[in-house]
Amino acid sequence: MMQVALFGAGRIGKIHAGNVVRQPGVALRYVVDVDAAAAQALAAQHGAEVATADAAFADKAVGAVVIGSSTDTHADLMERAARAGKAIFCEKPVDLDANRARACADVVQKAGVVCMIGFQRRFDPTFSALKDRLAAGEIGDPEMLVVTSRDPGAPPVEYLKRSGGIFRDMLIHDFDVFRWILDDDAATVYATGSVLTDPAVGTVGDVDCTAVAIRTRKGRLALINTTRRAAYGYDQRFEVLGSKGMLQAGNHRPTEVTAATAASVSQDKPEHFFLERYRAAYAIEMAHFFDAIAHGKPVRTTIADGVKALELADAATTSWREKRIVEL
């Protein structure tokens, strides 16, 4: 039985805990969180124990850790897990500082443990199907990618103060999608942004709407548009234009019922929040992680992918602040 220690008992920790206990041959042993009440409630729900980080790392029966705590803890916890010989699943980002992330990646790689970063969009069934059809050559060679990423509302300002900015906090997922779908890396990045949805965002030196243009090393083009507020729900979609056609991946809705009357034709709005939108993806990625451990398979989202996405976020931040194209 694989014993697991979970770090973080917040909203993403609760999702991961539920998915961990659904894996065959896996048990949640410990929950670690600075909020003792939250840790106790989650541990009780899944028959686990509350523990300190030191106790969890010292327990040789723990074979894997799942890290869903605050970003400023990620790199330290990953390094401790790697040195203790434990497999690692960690939410994005590796860290808010690219140099720190690269140092962490070096420790993890030298330890030789399984390490997976939580870029759940790669595991979304619709997005995965598009990737498979693209790889099969259905639309020829990919030439352009357009990504739309819109949240239903901005997080609290207190969160934004510690988030590292919209490019590291929100667009890091879009940068990973860009690299995954086009199987290419950026040569140049140009980013711009504005405060259009909530003036409070500007008071912490951030923006809430962005547009990013990327030219890849193979000459392909990608456009990413984002906003912290979409009145109609959580808007996540993209399209790829290829030499022989186009592939599109759209939004998820609570139901796929279409109502047609004399007055109008209507459908449900998109799912309202990312926890609902990516419910299936979270389950699939956790199953993938434990399958990789059990069978010695490579993981789909590596710590190197985490570092690359962070480097793109840094480049976009520099481009926005300095109003220039950044070469990578």
Image (cartoon, helix red, strand yellow):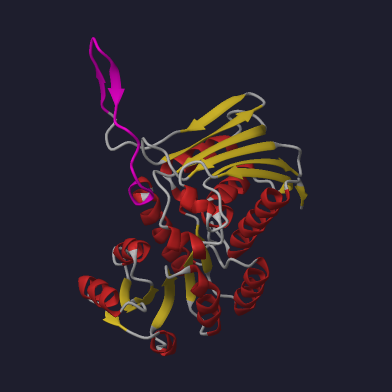
Q: How many numbered marks are there?
A: 0
Q: Farthest residue toward the top?
A: 262
Q: Quadrant of residue 41?
A: bottom left
55 w.r.t. 147: above or below: below
Q: Residue at x 50, y 52 (%)?
A: 201
Q: Farthest residue toward the right?
A: 327
235 w.r.t. 21: above or below: above
Q: Residue at x 26, y 71 (%)?
A: 42
* Residue 212 rendering spot, x and y as whole percentages: 63, 42
* Residue 255 rendering spot, x and y as whole percentages: 27, 34
Q: Residue at x 39, y 41 (%)?
A: 234
82 w.r.t. 221: above or below: below
Comparing 85 with 233, the one in front is 233
Q: Give the left or right position of residue 307, taking residue 232 as reference.
A: right
Q: Give the left or right position of residue 189, taking residue 139 as reference.
A: right
Magenta highlight range: 257-276
Comparing 164 with 104, the one in front is 164
183 inside magenta stretch: no
Screen quadrant of the N terminus: bottom left
Q: Residue at x 64, y 78 (%)?
A: 110
* Residue 2 rendering spot, x and y as whole percentages: 37, 75
Q: Quadrant of residue 265?
A: top left
Comparing 69 with 307, the one in front is 69
* Residue 200 rendering spot, x and y as whole percentages: 47, 52
